[in-house]
Image (cartoon, helix red, strand yellow):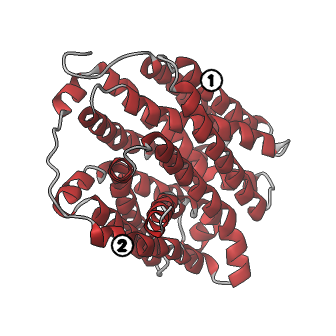
Amino acid sequence: MSLRSVVLVAGFVLAALNLRPAIAGVSPLLDEIMGDVGLSPAGGGAITTVMVVCLGVFGPVAPLLARRIGLDRTLLAGLLVIACGVALRGLDGAPVLYLGSALAATAIAVMNVSMPGVVKQHFPSRINVMTGVYVSAVVAGAAVASAVVIPVERLTGFGWRGVTALLAVPALLAALLWLPQALRGRPARSDGPRPYGTVLRSRVTWYVTALMGLQSLTFYVVLAWLPTIFMERGVPAEQAGYLLSLTNLVQVAASLAVPVLAGRRASQVPYVVGAGVLTVLGYLGVLLAPTTLPWLWMIVLGLGQGASFALVLLIIALRPADPAAVTALSAVAQSVGYVVAALGPLLFGYLRELSGGWSVPLTVALGVLAAQIVAGWLAGRPATLGPGRP
């Protein structure tokens, strides 16, 4: 492999690793952030909610930027904006905390939509492999961030502001590695077909969008509140961060293995339903016996959530009849799905305030998971989304 190829792959992987730390790095520090800034539980949950809303709302900006400056430069701009956003939220005051979070999430939204195009542009003969690498790197980035923020805070003595600002460093490193691609890339316009009319009229689109939104909602609830739930049950903060990291690390393995198996079959229903059931079991463990074998619940939860995320991306790629429809379906599913997902952390915060504990929020989450399994059964059935198809 040439040096150019090594730099390309390294830049791509590191860029993917930056797609979740700005979100995942908040939850282990959430109690400290709320106490320092003076936020209620709902206000603390709103940090993640703001970011997930931005993931849904600003994703459609990516095609506009790509047509104007090219995919490679769009990706570079996203990395630089992530760095600016996480650095900004380390400043004093709740407004800049939310503003910096929104800025970082907007960049992540643009990169989320751009990355599949980058895979096709730079790795046309290895799309399946590099898509798996991409998904695994996204999950691994969340796992690493949730595991290291507390130890880094204690090691450096920087406090939560300095630690969250340090998340700008990997984004800047990824930008440096990606810079040769951005300088080499052509900012030519890319005006491919946009079959949104066909996509929006299809029932398949809304099954997939529902699956995307519901599995994302339960994922971001875990990302935002899981360490807090464990800490309120007496688990030390550092161990709570490790438990969140464990479930994210298990997701890496699931996201690599499950699509290979599920992609060989016409129907993905058994896999999607199985992933939903595993997620239910993980939530039940946290609800009923959080301090009894918590590592087991995290493994089960990670298997379920990692498989669910990978499967919805696989279904998005399989259902449309042509590449242009894949892009359209992905845009619809991610935009609507992430807006739905944004309700999760905020709703959990309100339910925690109203009920005074976590039993009610976790029970509501089980109801959401039941709806996710139904959506998965509908989306996982064999179908083709294309002209004249349902």
Residue 129 point in image, percent of width and height: 50, 43
Residue 204 sits in which quadrant? top left
Considering only vertical position in the picture, is 201 above or below 224? above
Task: State the SS at label 1.
Answer: helix
Q: Residue furthest bottom?
A: 157
Residue 85 point in image, percent of width and height: 41, 72
Give the label, 2 or 1, closer to the camera: 2
Task: State the SS at label 2.
Answer: helix
Instruction: Tell whether 329 sits left or right of 266.
Output: left
Query: Reading the chain from its start, which is encountered first: label 2 or label 1?
Result: 2
Q: Which residue is mark 2?
A: 180
Whether residue 39 is visible to the viewer of this picture, yes or no, is yes
Instruction: Tell whether 67 sits left or right of 311.
Output: left
Considering only vertical position in the picture, is 327 above or below 274? below
Q: Which residue is mark 1?
A: 274
Identity of the residue drawn at 61% across and 52% down: 225
Residue 153 point in image, percent of width and height: 68, 76
Q: How many marks?
A: 2
Identity of the residue drawn at 58% across and 27% down: 261
How packed mark 2 is, by other alpha carbons closer than 10 Å (few <14, some 14-19, many 20 or more), is: some
Whether residue 89 is visible to the viewer of this picture, yes or no, is no
Residue 308 point in image, percent of width and height: 55, 34
How packed mark 1 is, by other alpha carbons closer than 10 Å (few <14, some 14-19, many 20 or more), is: some
* Three-letter amino acid code of the residue under disc 1: Gly
Q: Nearer the viewer, residue 266 or 308?
A: 266
* Three-letter amino acid code of the residue under disc 2: Pro
Instruction: Tell whether 58 sits left or right of 262.
Output: left
Do the residues under discs 2 and 1 have CB atoms within 8 angstroms? Answer: no
